[in-house]
Amino acid sequence: MPHSVDYIKRLADKHGRGLESLLPILENVYLDRHIISEDAMVEIARELDVSAAKVFGTATFYSFLETEKCGKYVIRVCKTITCMMHGKNQIIKEIEELLKIKLGETTPDGLFTLKETNCLGHCHKGPAMLINDTPYTELTPEKVREIINQYRVTAQKSAS
Amino acid sequence: MKEGLKRLDLIFKNEHDCEVILEKSLERSNDELIEDLISSGLKGRGGAGFPTGLKWKLSAEAEGKEKYVICNADEGEPGTFKDREILSSVPHKVLTGMAICGRIIGSQKGFIYLRGEYKFLIPELQKVIDGFHELLDKLDLNFRVEIFVGAGAYICGEETALFESMEGHRGEPRNKPPFPTDAGYRNGPTVINNVETLAHTYSILKYGPEKFKDLGVKDSRGSKVFSVSGDTPIPGIYELEFGMTLQKFVDDFGDGDAKAVQVGGAAGFCVPRKKFDKTVIGYKGKLTGTSLPTGGSMMIFNSSRSMYNVLHNYLDFFVEESCGQCTPCRVGTQQLLLGIEAVKRGDKSSQYLEELLELAETMRVTAKCGLGQSVANSFSSIVENFREEMIY
C-alpha cells in the first residue's frame, strides 16, 4: 500500500522518529482512520526502526487506541461507580435502541460505535459519556436523544 | 450549614500574578525556595503524600544531563475530578510551580501528562501555555512545557508507568528503586507532581510557607481539594482543611442517610457509619483515631446502596485496568471478582470470604505497584464491614 507508506512517513516527519513519538503517531493514525490497522503498525515499526511486535504491544495496551474499525463517532459511556449509581444502564439502553446496535458494536453506516469506559472524571455530574473527545454530563434519555440527533444532522450536512 | 466545615479559597482564588511571583522567586536562591517548601509541610496531593520539598531537593541534588518536570494530570481514580477543574480554571498556577521547579532542579523541559479523557481541555490549556512561554522569555527563564496526551489507561497515573507510556512503551510500572528523582523519564532525574500539588506551590511562593502551614493539622498541612460525589445533595469540588473527621464531613455533605464513605477512590478505604467519628482525613501521623490519606475522592453511599454492587464495580474496574505485568495483580483481581460472585451465588460458602481476604492481603505485599497493592484497601474494608451484604 504505497498510500499508507507515504502517510506514515509524513506522520513520522511531523511527530519525530524516536519511540517518544510512538503514542502521538498511533493517536494520529486513529484520529484520521478510526482504526490502527496491522498494515499501519508494520509501517510505523519500519519508520521508527523498531519491531512490529513493539508497536503492536503498545497500540493494544491503551483502550483509546482502537485496533478494530470504529465509527466516525465513538460513544464511551462511563460505567464506574457513581455513573452506575446515577443510571448509566438506562443511558446505554436508550442509545442501543436509538442506534439499533448493542454495546461494542458499530452502526452499519459507520457513524457510531458504542462502548463502555472507566471513570471519565465527571462523577459529580453523572451519568457521563464522551463522544470522541467531547464530554456530555448529567445525561437523561431525552438529553441523549437530542445529542445523538445533533451528530446525525452534522454528519448528514458534511456528507451533502 | 452555619457551623459546618470551613470552606477555603486558596487554590481556586482568582489571582493572576505569575509575573510578580516568578520575578520574586527567581531572585531567591534554590536553597531558600526548597527550605520554604519543606517548612510549609506540603505533601503530594495525588494521594501518596510524599513531601514535595524533599522531592524537589532530591532531584536538584541528583546527577543527570537532562532533567524533567512532569505534571501528572492522568487523573483516573474513580471519584476524582479536581485536577480537571484546576487545569481548566487556574492552569497558570500549575505552570508557575513547574517553572520554579525547573529552575530549582536545573530542568528546561516540563510536560503535562494529560489523560486522554481530558483531551477537550487542550485548546484552552495550550493557549495558557503559549502565553506563559512568552512570560518566561521576558523573564529570561529557559523552560518549556509540552502537553503529552495519554490514551485511556488508569495505570499510567502511576509515575513510572507514566514514564514508560511517554517513552512509547506499554504502561507497565518499573521496579523502584531507582526512584524518579534519580532516574525517571528517559532515565533523567524527574520531579513528577500531581496537578494540585503544583498549584499549591504557587500559593506557598506567593504567601510564604507560614500561611499554608497554619491550615490543617500536624503532619497534614494546608488545604485539600476534595471531589465529592455519590449520594449527596451537593456533589462537586470543595477546598477544605485537613484533619476533619468523617462525621463532620458527612454532616455537611451527606443526604442524611449515609451508610458508608469511600475515601480515596476505588484504591482507597470504605468507612462504615459506625466509624465516621473515629476517622480523620489526613496523612498518617499521630491523630486521634484512624487517619486516612486521600487524593481527594469522597464517594458517599446511602442505605439504599448495595455494597456488594459497589465492590463488584471496583473489582471490575481493577480487572480491566490491571496492566497484567505481575501475577498477583493480574490473577488476583480476577479471582477476587470471581470469588465474590461465587459466594453471592451460593456456589461457595461464606467461609470462602476469609480465603479471599487472605488473597487480597497477599496482593498487598506481593504486587509490584500501587494498583495491585491497594486493591486490598477497598476489598478488605468493604468485605469486613459489610459481610452480610456479600453473602445475602
Image (tube, grey):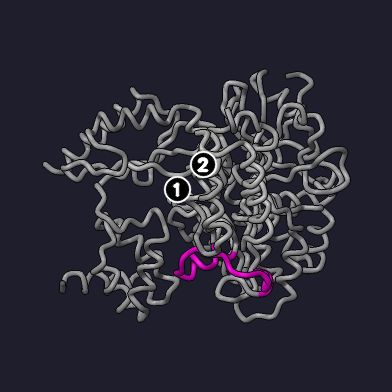
Determine which quarter of the picture holds residue A98.
Answer: top left
- Give the mark count: 2
Q: Quadrant of the N terminus of chain B?
A: top right
Q: Position of residue A149 (x, y in %)?
A: 25, 30
* Magenta part of the chain: B160-182
Q: CA distance from mark 2 to mark 1?
A: 8 Å
Q: Position of residue B279 (x, y in %)?
A: 79, 35
Q: Quadrant of the C terminus of chain B?
A: top right
Residue at image position (32%, 56%) is: A66
Q: Position of residue A156 (x, y in %)?
A: 16, 38
Q: Chain of mark 1?
A: B
Determine which quarter of the picture holds residue B15.
Answer: top right
Task: Tell me the amino acid under the disc marked 1.
Answer: Glu
Residue on which disc 1 sits:
B117
Q: Predominant secondary structure in magenta?
A: loop
Note whether residue B89 is visible. yes
